Image: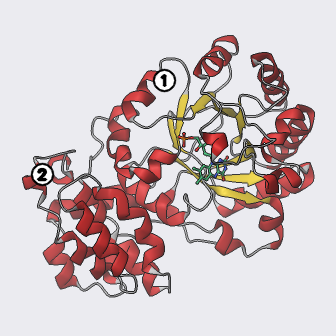
Amino acid sequence: MAARGGDLVAGKRAGSLTGAVWADTLPPAMETTLTTLTTAPAAGPRRGEVRALSVAPMMARTDRHLRYFLRQLSRRTLLYTEMVTTGAVIHGDREKLIGFSPEEGPVALQLGGSDPRELAECAKIAEDWGYDEVNLNVGCPSDRVQSGRFGACLMAEPERVAECVVAMRAAVRVPVTVKHRIGIDGLEAYEDMLRFVDLVAAAGADRFTAHARIAILAGLSPKENREVPPLRYDDVYRLKRERPGLDIEINGGIRTLEAARAHLEHVDAVMIGRAAYEDPYVFARADRDVFGDADAPVLTRREAVLAMLSYVARETARGERLHHITRHMLPLFARQAGGRQWRRRLSTGQDGGAEVLIDALRVIPPDEALGGEGEGASAAA
Ligand SMILES: Cc1cc2nc3c(=O)[nH]c(=O)nc-3n(C[C@H](O)[C@H](O)[C@H](O)COP(=O)(O)O)c2cc1C
């Protein structure tokens, strides 16, 4: 299990980074901000607590490195893992599958499965491992997942999902939540979703995250299922209106904090998926603009890179490939001066350590020259 307790700033002495490089790279005020950001992980969600913004579970995307990077931008946003099947958690290499750094918290583990006993076992493992929440996937439409009888096809079996939630609920103290679709082919009406939610809420689910489009299980690929069925936000708003006591989160097609705030007029929380890896800098203002934390630092893009250096040094010293971390940072400067060269330098320097990032930053104009986009950490400190 990953050790608890932030050591990011201490970690700057690890790996290939020397104090001299740091002295050159890190403005003194930045160190203070990094300490603030990383030595006191935000408390995880408790049952009954509403967390207004999250990053969606996404296979091959929301691995520990993307989560660590996003955490530098927002302390409060809830981050999800990729979906991990119960079979993998029970029989697989846990450190590899569900290991995470304490600084990533709050983090929710998403499970794929439909066996109540196995899900309860995995929920307990997740809690013991330090996860802040356990989430059940009732939204994935892939053939592989359907053949395992879990994911979105479980929308047709609300009683089974309820059994799963009862078992998970009994096994852990952390929130047990469900991510689902507003329907599947054959069960497309609002009333079908309402019946599903009512049964699963009675079983004790702590939050419902509704991807606001149906999943068409026969004939569409997972990618098409994220694009073709139309978004029906009104169904999710109506769910919140008709079940005001439930914690309802909306998901699907939300790309900016402005859009998120508009949805928050109708629901408790907003989950952002693809925008989180296509444009991670979206989250830089989340603590201020969504969570209302006026004192939260807003890192510039450059500062976000600097905030990653000690982590990169630590991880590469442990044998992690640099590319596994930096691939999530490639779009950071998209549409910014130097953005293309940044991408190129990061993509070509795959075998180094943190010095590759420092070198790539040389193509980016200083923050002052960028006209103060965001607000520098130094200004906020
Ligand atoms: C690459 C990728 C992988 C995904 N993997 C998962 C997953 O593991 N579990 C899940 O519940 N949803 C998964 N999804 C769906 C997202 O969580 C989210 O519901 C969907 O992308 C819609 O939100 P968005 O429009 O903000 O991207 C995935 C989506 C993408 C793009």
Measure the C-alpha gap from mark 1 to mark 2.
31 Å
The x, y position of residue 134, in whole percent, is 70, 48
Which residue in the protein does label 2 denote?
Answer: 370
Residue 119 percent location from the top left of the image: 84, 53
Q: Residue at x 81, y 57 (%)?
A: 144
Per the image, the residue denoted by label 1 is: 264
Secondary structure beneath disc 1?
A: loop
> How many other residues sit within 10 Å of disc 2, few (<14), some (14-19) or many (≥20)?
few
In this view of the protein, can residue 10 be seen by the observer? no
Q: Is residue 320 above or below residue 366?
A: below
Task: Tell which of 254 and 37 is nearer to you.
Answer: 254
Q: Is residue 320 left or right of residue 58?
A: left
Q: Quadrant of residue 333?
A: bottom left
Relative depth, front residue between 305 and 205: 305
Kind of residue at disc 2? Leu
Disc 1 residue type? Leu
Q: Secondary structure at mark 2?
A: helix
Quadrant position of residue 203? top right
Image position of 234 (left or right of 143):
left
- The residue drawn where x is 77% and y is 65% is 89
Count neighbours of disc 1 (C-alpha within 10 A) and say few if under 14, some if 14 to 19, many if 20 or more.
Answer: some
